[in-house]
Image: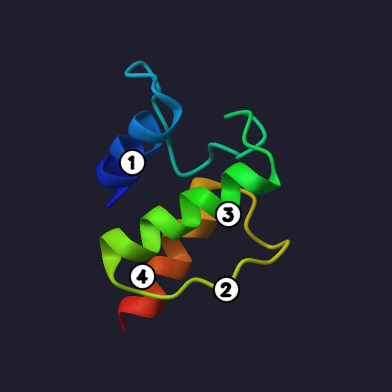
Amino acid sequence: MLERIEEILRDYKGDNDIAVTRETTFESLELDSLDTVELVMNLEEEFEITIEIDDGIKTIGDLMRIIESAQG
């Protein structure tokens, strides 16, 4: 899943050099709230889930936990 999220981020940002870990923050990726919403929409489509955006999503790991939970 981490690799797929990284690929989606690379496509979104247009930067093939982006590398992420579970600890990578959205702030370190220079994603503002609009970017985050658009990224989440892309992830929802990719993983066929619904993600509730809240202030608790700070890192890629947070996002992965939400995706894993939504997939059941």
Element type at marker 4? helix
Label whose residue precedes the other's in the sequence (1 or 3): 1
Residue identified by numbered label 2? 52
Q: Are marks 4 and 3 in contact (CB under 8 Å)?
A: no
Looking at the rendered image, the disc whose residue lies closer to the viewer, 2 or 3, is 3
Q: Residue at x 60, y 40 (%)?
A: 26
Q: Amino acid at mark 4?
A: Glu
Which residue is under mark 4? 68
Toward the top, the furthest residue is 17
Q: Earlier in the sequence, mark 1 or mark 4?
A: 1
Between disc 2 and disc 4, the foreground one is 2
- Outermost residue toward the right in this view: 55
Mark before the other along the chain sequence, 2 or 4: 2
Residue 44 coordinates in the image, percent (x, y): 38, 65
The amino acid pointed to by label 3 is Val
Relative to 35, is 9 on the left or the right?
left
Residue with the mark numbered 1: 8
SS class, disc 2: loop
x then y, percent, for residue 16: 32, 19
Q: Of helix, strand and loop, which one carries label 1?
A: helix
- In screen coordinates, is 5 left or right of 26? left
- The span from disc 2 to disc 4 (Cα, nearest Å) is 13 Å
- In the rendering, at what x and y percent does residue 23 appear? 53, 41
Q: Secondary structure at mark 3?
A: helix
Q: Which mark is residue 37?
A: 3
